[in-house]
Structure formats: structure tokens, C-alpha cells
Amino acid sequence: MKKLVEIKDVCKIYNPGENEVRALNHVNLTIGEGEFVAIIGQSGSGKSTLMNMLGCLDTPTSGKYYLHGQDVSHMTDDEQSDVRNREIGFIFQGFNLIPSLTALENVELPLIYRGVSKKERDRLAHAALNSVGLEKRKTHRPNEMSGGQQQRVAIARAIAQAPPILLADEPTGNLDTGSTKEIISIIKRLYKEGRTVIIITHDPGIAQQAKRIITISDGEIKSDIINENYVD
Amino acid sequence: MGTFGEYIKSALSSIKNNKGRSFLTMLGIIIGISAVLTVLVLGDGMKETVNGEIDSMGAATISVNLDTTKTDKTFDQDSINQVEENLKNIYGVAPSFTTWGYVKGKHTQYEMMMQGTSEAAKEGGSVKLAHGRFFTRGDVEDCKPVCVISQIAAEKIFGYEDVVGQNIELTFDDRTAEFTIVGVTENTPQDISYAGYGGDPYFIGSAPYTSFATAFNWNIDDFTSITIYLDSEYKNDVLKQTRSVVENVLGIRGENAVKVSSGYGTDQTTETILNIITSVVAIIAAISLLVGGIGVMNIMTVSVTERTREIGIRKSLGARTSSILVQFLAEAAILTFTGGLIGIALGLSLAFLICKVIDFAFVVNPLLIAIVVAISTAIGLFFGIYPARRAAKLDPIEALRTE
């Protein structure tokens, strides 16, 4: 299996000096292409820092992060933006749709930043909305949709330009049971279609849906196991 | 370019989503732009109106006056001819005098004024003939007793208009002579305004100055002022040369005795006053635009704070610093550009109304409009820089954490 994510001896230290906080402490982690990984941890465990690191929103204090073989540990803001745009599809707990834009316009955003032509953008955005079953809602704004529908738009946005990694941060944290099932089944389907999926969560029930479960605590990886109970 | 269009679109939709607030923000710009535009258009209209009047009165004349306290030199026929020869691009030079006297009408005598001049007054004075001809150089040189009078004077004296070939009896200084009318000139605003005094005295027309001299036994070698007739196109050039030419011809040196002025001193005064008014209003407008600009900066800063999360989302999706910067700059610029357009519409309407009321020409210089549009957009770009940079520099993690 080809290495997609390779984190080597990464530390992230906030407030270096007397009151320093080691959010990540010598973390090593490798994720291959096409894996379905859950990273589980309590709040304050360092999982958010790890997710920011994986999503190229943050850079390590020390250590290296290779994404797709490229060293992304020390980059300018704009270089990070480009890597995020190219490599990562984010799915957030709070959906993070832009309220003033319609579903379709929200899905088009990353394509705009990539510089995709209007015609191609339109095609890709429609296809993505279609794959989450929301084509009929394309002209709706976020406040006209349920939480589950909003999260489906967010997923469409994350997959529209087919990035190698889907990074989901508590994707069902704000959803009821019904919507949760729906979102999980979409994420599973995306995994089966060949995408690499990383879910960050504090909920063991959600983590159990993944094929590989990594537990993080106090900024260190405590366990990294293959989920025996994984159901397709 | 395609993505730039997207930034504009998103800026537009954000303005549309905050209609009330956007309008209030634009208000300062609207007031400033419409104020400055109204005054500038009125200024252009005034210049156009004044110039129009001057043209019809024979705009291009230059007066030369000798200060008799500083020199005892005067113009005689020779020196007048020499001045004429030494100046380029002129129609001619004539001693200018207006003389008061009487004209015999059908039933009664009228008090009146006539101008003694040369044939150059025809071109330089933009004289239009209704009937007959103007007097010629030959008439001037041969001191022929001919004259031209205005339509309104013909009506008054003869009771009808086409009086070419008729004689009129003129009396100046107790001497009386008969002059033959060779032409009837179209009424000028000047003729009409003189006639407006009710009857006499009024300005009836012109005759060769040499003819006056011969007929009334005047000395024509002792003029202290002359008029140069020319096309207004050359006015500035000729103005520059006139003084030295006259000083050379008369042999006056450095005594500051030659006063040169362009025919209509009043229009310069009006222009000066107008320029002062324009500068004052320009300063007020500049202050208003500055305040408007600060308003834009303020509202954009608020907008950036309100939309911190949106900025975080955009950055997480791959927006570069420059994309965010352009988006917010475009928003500020569109805001002031739109304000500028509304201000232009308002300013032009206001100027149009005022021009109608005070009877000015309504002139719109397209360049002025272009400059105003450019300035209003520039205000947005300038005052948008601070908030836009603030937005662009936001840390995506922090921004995403904001509720």
C-alpha cells in the first residue's frame, strides 16, 4: 500500500517555556492510500491538534510531515492553502457552510480556488451534489436545510474536486441518530469507492465504524489497531 | 480572470445581503460625489455660458491703453499701422473710441453712441450682416462717410429694416454730417441691451474712425488707446507679444506705461470667483469623501469580524491570502463605486435642475465623469486595504473556532 500520510516524530508545543503545553509529543503515524481510519481521543488529548496538522492548517514545532511524499512541515500560508485545496477535503462538525451562498455555490468554492473553469466547475459540483442525493436542493441556502442535509452538502464540497484525503472532524457531532446513520453510510460508501478517509472523534460508537482505530491521549498515540468488528 | 469574476460576484452578493447597511455606508460617498459633481458641472456650464456670450459680443479683442501720467507718447496713424504689421495672426488694429451725439430720425432727433473703428472690427467682432456690407479698408483709408447700423437702430430711425443706401444725419460736437449706410448688422445682445434703455441714448453702429475725423474735424494722431481684433484662438499668443511690440513702435522703454488687457476683464473675475467657489466646495467634498471612506473602512472592519468564520472556511478550502484580500477589496471598491454612480446620477440631476433655473448651459464633460468614477473606486480600494488585510491575515484555525 502506498504511503499517503507519513508523520515522523512530530511535536507541537504551545507557549514554549515555563507553561508549555505539549499538544503532540513525538507522534509517529503512517496512513496508506485507501485506508479508513478513526482517530479517537478525549478533549484535550491532542486529537484536534493532530487533525489540524493532518489538514495542513498547522505546522509542527519539530518533526516532519510528508503528505503524498511532499514535505509539508514548513510552508508559507499560501503554500499550505494550495496543499489543502489539492489534497484534502474537510468535513467539519459544524458543517461550516457559508450562509450567504446556495448549496451549489458552497460546493463550487474549492473549485473556484483551484481555478477550475465555470463549465467544469458546474459539472463537478452537480456530480458531487448528486452523489449525496441533494441535487434538488442545489439552490437552497444552508438555513433552509436540515443538519443532515447541510452535512451532506459539506461532504459534496469535500469530494467535489476529488482530493486524496477526506478529513472528517466529528462529522456527526451535531446530528441526530437518523442523520448520523445517513452520514456514516455516505462516508463508508466514499471509502469503498477508493477514497482515504480519516475521522476524528471522541465517540467510540463512531470510531467502531472505521477499519483502523488510533487512540490518542496526552499528545501520544496509545494504541493503533485494526478494527475486528468492522462491518461493510 | 475567471476567479476574479467570482470574487466580484461574491462581493456583490454580500453587499446585496446587507442592503440597508451597504446603503448607509455609501451615503457619505454619495453626498461627497454628488456635491463635487454638481459644482463642477455648474462651473463648466457657467464658463460655457459666459464664453458663449463673449463670442457673440466679439470675444477676441485686446485693448492697449497708454498711461498718460507715465508717457506723453500717443498713437497716430503710422504707429497704428506699424503695430498692425508687427503682430501676427490678427485681423487688424484700430483706435477704439465710442462717441456720443445725435442722429436725425424721421420725426425727431435721438441721442446715441457710435463706434469709430476700422474694417478689422468686422471679423474680430464677429459682426453678422443682415443686409449690405461692412465698410472696407478702402473706406477707412479714403475716409469715406459710410457706416453700418444695427437692425434695431434701423427700425427706430427709419421705421423699417433694410436701409442700405440711405443717408443718416449725424451730429457730434455741434457739427453735422451725412453718412451713407452700407450695411445693416444683425442685433447683438449688446445692441438689444442698449436699446432697452427706452430710446436714447443707444448704440446704433460703427463707422470708419478716419471718416469721423474728416467729417467732424477731429485729430486722429493722438489716441491713447487702441483695440486689436483677432481670432480668440490666438488671443494668448498675441497677448504675450503686444506689450513689447507697442513699446518698440512708440519708443517707450521700461516705464510701465503700456497697459494690455484682453477685451473682457469681467469674465476673468467671474472665473476667479468660480475657481474660489470650486476650491472651497472641493475641499468640503474631499472632507466628505474622507469621512465616507472612513465609514467604509469601519463597516468593512465590522464585516470582517462578523465573517471571521467564513474567512476560516474559505482558507481551509484553499483560499490564498491574496484571494481573501481581493474579495474584501472588491467588496469595498464595489461599495464606493456604486455610491459613486448614485452620486453621479444625483449630482447630474441637481446640476441639471440648477442650470435650468438660473439659465446656464448644461455641459457634461465625459472625462469628468470618468475621473469621478475612478476616484470613488479608488476610495474603496484605499480604505478597504486595512480591513481586507486583516481578513487575509487571519489564522484559519482561530477563524474556524469563532462562532
Image (cartoon, helix red, strand yellow):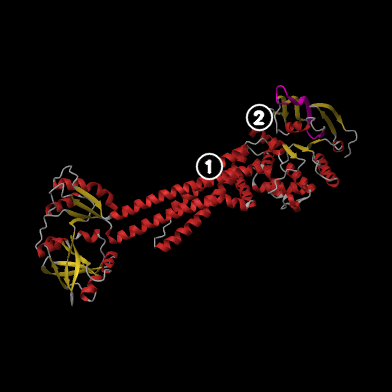
For residue B361, what is the image quadrant? bottom left
Subunit that carries the residue with mark 2 = A
Q: Secondary structure at mark 2?
A: loop
Q: CA distance from mark 2 to mark 1?
A: 30 Å
Closer to the camera in the image, A68 or B393: B393
Q: Chain of mark 1?
A: B
In this picture, which residue range is highlighted in magenta?
Answer: A13-39
**Is B377 positioned to the left or the right of A82 in the image?**
left
Which one is in front, B9 or B161? B161
Residue A34: horizontal and vertical position, in percent? 80, 35
Residue that badge 2 annotates = A75
Magenta segment includes B226: no
The answer to whether B312 appears left or right of B62 in the picture is right
Q: Looking at the picture, how far across and down is residue A144, in whole percent?
A: 75, 52
Question: Label 1, on which residue?
Answer: B382
* Residue A194 placement: quadrant: top right
Residue B1 seen = no
Question: Looking at the picture, which amino acid does disc 2 mark?
Answer: Met
Q: Nearer the viewer, residue A192 or A223?
A: A223
Q: Residue at x 43, y 54 (%)?
A: B39
Graded by Cα atoms within 10 Å as few (under 14), some (14 to 19) or many (20 or more), the crowding at tag 2 reads some
